[in-house]
Amino acid sequence: MNQPHPDPVVDYHDVVKTFGAGATEVRALNGVSLSVRAGEFTAIMGPSGCGKSTLLHLGGGLELPTAGSVRFDGHDLAAIGPSRLAEIRRRHLGYVFQSLNLVSSLTALENVMLPMELDGLSVRDARAHAIEALAQVGIEQQLDRHPDSFSGGQQQRIAIARAVVGERKVLFADEPTGALDTLTADQVVEVLAGLTDRGVAVVMVTHEPRFASWADRVVFLRDGKVVDESVAAGSGVSR
């Protein structure tokens, strides 16, 4: 296991997230505090509806908390303004959805190049970074093919490469193995675990204990609260 950086990359402090109002209000998160460190693999587990995906959405800046704070590298995501928040999401935060959201009209290489090109990087540099990211997840050939010509596991690897290309510091993965067969799912989780060697913090939602066993620690949610936490022996992770 890696020795994570002592300072949190993402820090949730007493986070509350509600949806709706009045009689229809739903409290998805209820006072969650959690720190995520560089080079750390964190698995999030719990029953359906306990707030797992909401936790990832807030950490990735896709939503903002109702109360409390979510900080990235010490910056409160709710206080930095929409343009700066968008910049942080583009450059430093990666997100892998179960549905992948690959652009079917683009090739594998173009899908991975896309976020860098949107950020103003030259085509030449974006291409070089994209090829490197795809190689790191085991996709090194036929990069000019479109996503639907790859297997489900290969498509997931392309999505992971797109999520971590460049200088991304955190990867949020929401049930990335849900639609995969057992062997392919094991390979994808192995790829995620390997990203921590580069110092990437990986936060993965999963229902499967065998996938969570790859993590440096497992955080258990229930009814929007952290109810337990398990740290792997020798991981160097402090509670």
Image (cartoon, rainbow, N blue to C red):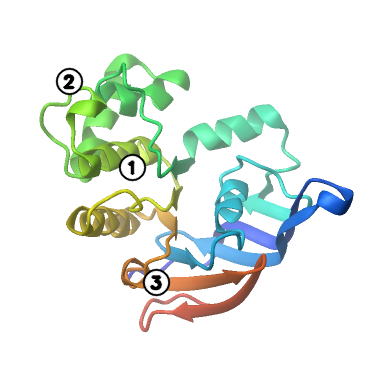
Q: Quadrant of the C terminus?
A: bottom right
Q: Nearer the viewer, mark 2 or mark 3?
A: 2
Q: CA distance from mark 2 to mark 3?
A: 36 Å
Q: Provide the residue designation for mark 2.
A: 144
Viewer-closest of 35 and 48: 48
- Inspect the image, locate mark 1, and give the three-letter code of the amino acid beneath it: Ile
Q: Earlier in the sequence, mark 1 or mark 2?
A: 2
Q: CA distance from mark 1 to mark 2?
A: 17 Å
Along the horizontal axis of the image, is 109 left or right of 10? left
Q: Secondary structure at mark 1?
A: helix
> How many tags in the picture?
3
Residue 228, quarter of the rendered image: bottom right
Along the horizontal axis of the image, is 182 left or right of 98? left
Which label is found at residue 160? 1
Name the spot of residue 85 as percent of width and height, x first.
Answer: 63, 35
- Inspect the image, locate mark 2, and give the three-letter code of the amino acid beneath it: Asp
Viewer-closest of 83 and 180: 180
Looking at this rendering, what residue extends furthest in the front direction?
23
Q: Provide the residue designation for mark 3.
A: 216
